[in-house]
Amino acid sequence: MSDTQIEYRRIEGRSTPFYQMLLVLTVMAVAGVVATWILWSEGLHLSGMTNRIPWGVQITMAVFYIGLSAGSLVVSGLYGVFGRIEYKPFARLAAYIAMLFLIAGLLSILTDQGRMDRVFVEPFTHFNVRSMFSINPGLYMGHIVLCVVYLWALFREKKLLTRVAAVVVVLWAITVHTGTGMILGFIPRELHQSPLLPPSFVAAALASGTALMIIVLVTLFRLTRRHLDDALIVWLGRLLAISLVVVFYFMFIESAYRYYLIESREAARFYLFGGFHSVLLWGGLMIVGCLIPSVILFHPRLGRTIPWIVFAAAMVVFGVLCERYVIVIPGQTNPPELFPGMVITTSPLDEGFVSYSISSYEALQAVGVLGIVGLLFVLGLKYLALAPVEARLPRGAGS
């Protein structure tokens, strides 16, 4: 397969299962819109959020989606940045998915707001260079624009522009997720503040994005009966395995550092062994999301078997979702030390440890965002030539 022999083709989208999928996704989207309307008109007191927990499941999902967006571009960047021609068939699809998941992240942030009308004005009219909340909206919008330019270059087969746009968009994606990590990492609270949090976010994004692309590619090619060389997925599995090692390294160093310092040991103990979030940390992230997939992907036989690679990738996506939750939520439920060395006699905020539970409205909002992104993805496959007829390993190339 040479650079000029790749044929991209739309899916027909005329079957009964296709229309059933559209119907399900539409119902999901409508449910999310209705739930958002109720919260907007009645008030956020219907959600599980409080004065102490202003960031709930929607912000957790936003961080997760933005990470998937950044990580998905890794697969596209294998061709655009590193010139690996065997991964050119996936470049368009990966770039499109990256754009969709950034949109999903922005929708999650939007639906989390009590005053959604201010989201389109306040961040751009009151810019503060010392606030990551002020900087990130520009990064997000720039990322979407760059993805559009990159997709246009890929569709037009403009090699020089593709290479330049790929480098810029991949670097921008890393910057975007670094900025997202800085929102939390630069907050002066014990379970948030950490200079390691931004690179940890990026590492988890690369792992989850690569895992997602493995699942999407294998599923899409099999459902549409298009040929996909196993060796291409096996190599992505190896890349995913290395990413998992990096994720585990960052998580271990950050947790060990917090537990080592006497002043943060109590908070670290709460983080590691303090309740439901600890179950997600150890069970969801460490065991399901890192340990088991690593064993599978590094195994000489299982790591070369496509169903096992897809299974491992699914566990990684779930594990990173757990990681996003245990980063966002416990830092709010843990008592903040607002004034070190001083005793607070009265406060409008709840004192001590607090709890957070996801309300049905928030769950429907999350379902709605997935429905909207799912519709955009399926319709994109129908009306845009995103997927190739086949993806084969070039003759003489290694796996």
Image: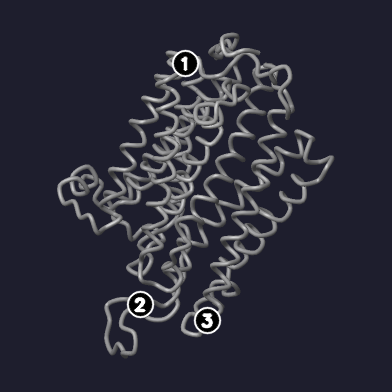
Q: Which mark is residue 265?
A: 3
Q: Helix or strand or loop: what does disc 2 sit on? A: loop
Q: Dot 2: within a 10 Å radius of its alpha carbon, few (fewer than 14), some, or many (20 or more) residues?
A: few
Classed neighbour count for the residue bearing mark 3: other residues with Cα under 10 Å, few (<14), some (14–19), many (≥20) = some
Which residue is denoted by mark 1 in the rendering?
384
Between disc 3 and disc 1, the foreground one is 3
In primary-sequence order, the first of circles 2 and 1 is 2
Q: Look at label 2 and name its amino acid.
A: Asp
Q: Secondary structure at mark 3?
A: helix
Q: Which mark is residue 350?
A: 2
Question: Which of the two residues, 12 or 122, is positioned nearer the viewer here?
Answer: 122
In the picture as drawn, the residue positioned furthest to the left comes out as 125
Q: CA distance from mark 2 to mark 1?
A: 52 Å
Between circles 2 and 1, the one closer to the viewer is 1
**Amino acid residing under circle 1:** Leu
Of pointers 3 and 1, the one earlier in the residue sequence: 3
Observer-nearest of 103 and 46: 103
Residue at 18% from the left image edge and 44% from the top image edge: 121
Count of number-bearing discs? 3
Q: Does residue 372 appear in this view? A: no
Between residue 183 and residue 80, name the one nearer to us: 80
Name the residue: 45% across, 61% down: 328
